[in-house]
Image (cartoon, grey):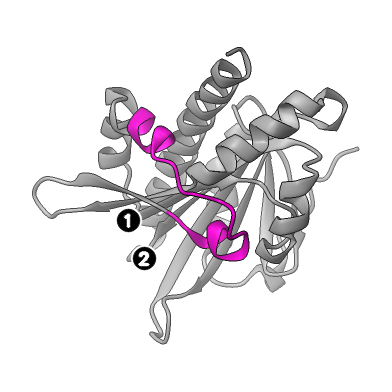
């Protein structure tokens, strides 16, 4: 079914520009509430959510690009892979990319899930994997985003995480890249294209990381 639809004024802001510049890379797209959902033609993730919001209490806008990359779907889940999900669920992390003349990624554990599930003990295995991947670190510094949050999919909202943790129906990565004010359509187009490429590369390596753990 073709999910493509005409440009809608309800999209608001410059979000139409994102669709225009990514058109060669996407099969279709749809509008869902405040988000647009893009379905790529050939990427390591199967869908990307894009939303324009505000930076805290500021009037300045920020852009969020979230890629969902499924490693094992519902039909492929076994008890062993449910255990694998719980093992990896403690590895959520965040990357802040800062610097004016020389941008540098700074890695840290992201503990939102452990706040809801006290039994989780944060684990740096994924952080170490990412830090030691020169290709990924280089891509992060060259992409004009300021923050990247990487974690396992845990349901439609974070508050579903405890139940999903006990009985995960799939293993999928949710990776969100955030960019502050872009300064116009030209820069926004560049941000969208480079962020798409970064999320594609991250999803590829996250899948490889998970499959390697599944084989041990």
Q: Tell me the magenta residue range.
A: 110-130
Q: Which residue is labeled 2 in the image?
A: 180
- Say above or below: 204 vs 187: above
User: Is residue 69 visible to us here?
Assistant: no
Indicate which disc residue 202 carries: none
- Quarter-of-image position of residue 36: bottom right
| Helix, strand or loop for disc 1 | loop
**Residue 43 % position (x, y):** 60, 27
**Residue 167 % position (x, y):** 80, 44
- Say above or below: 13 vs 114: below
Judged left or right of residue 178, residue 157 is: right
Which residue appears at 49% of the width and 40% of the height?
Answer: 196
Label 2 neighbourhood size at 10 Å, few (<14), some (14-19), many (20+)?
A: some
- Say above or below: 212 vs 106: above
CB under 8 Å between discs 2 and 1 = yes
User: Is residue 200 visible to us here?
Assistant: yes
Which residue appears at 8% of the width and 49% of the height?
Answer: 101
Quick check: is 111 in the magenta stretch? Answer: yes
Q: Which residue is labeled 1 in the image?
A: 146
Label 1 neighbourhood size at 10 Å, few (<14), some (14-19), many (20+)?
A: some
Judged left or right of residue 82, residue 49 is: left
Which residue in the rendered view is the most extreme toward the right?
A: 1
Quick check: is 149 in the magenta stretch? Answer: no
Which residue in the rendered view is the most extreme toward the front?
A: 119
- Say above or below: 11 vs 134: below
Which residue appears at 50% of the width and 59% of the height?
Answer: 64
Q: Nearer the viewer, residue 7 or 50?
A: 50
Q: Nearer the viewer, residue 107 or 118?
A: 118
């Amino acid at each position: 079914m073709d999910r493509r639809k005409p440009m809608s004024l309800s999209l608001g802001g410059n979000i139409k520009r994102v669709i225009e510049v990514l058109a060669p890379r996407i099969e279709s797209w749809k509008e869902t509430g405040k988000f647009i959902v893009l379905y790529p033609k050939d990427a390591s993730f199967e869908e990307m959510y894009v939303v324009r919001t505000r930076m805290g209490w500021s009037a300045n806008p920020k852009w969020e690009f979230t890629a969902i990359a499924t490693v094992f779907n519902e039909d492929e889940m076994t008890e062993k892979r449910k255990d694998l999900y719980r093992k990896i669920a403690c590895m959520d992390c965040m990357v802040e990319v800062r610097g004016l003349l020389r941008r540098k990624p700074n890695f840290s554990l992201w503990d939102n899930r452990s706040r809801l599930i006290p039994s989780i003990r944060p684990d740096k295995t994924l952080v170490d994997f990412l830090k030691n991947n020169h290709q990924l670190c280089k891509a992060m510094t060259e992409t004009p985003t300021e923050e990247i949050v990487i974690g396992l999919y845990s349901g439609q909202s974070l508050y579903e995480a405890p139940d999903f943790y006990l009985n995960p129906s799939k293993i999928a990565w949710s990776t969100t890249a955030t960019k502050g004010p872009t300064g116009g359509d030209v820069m926004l187009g560049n941000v969208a294209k480079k962020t798409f490429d970064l999320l594609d590369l991250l999803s590829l390596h996250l899948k490889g990381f998970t499959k390697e753990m599944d084989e041990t």
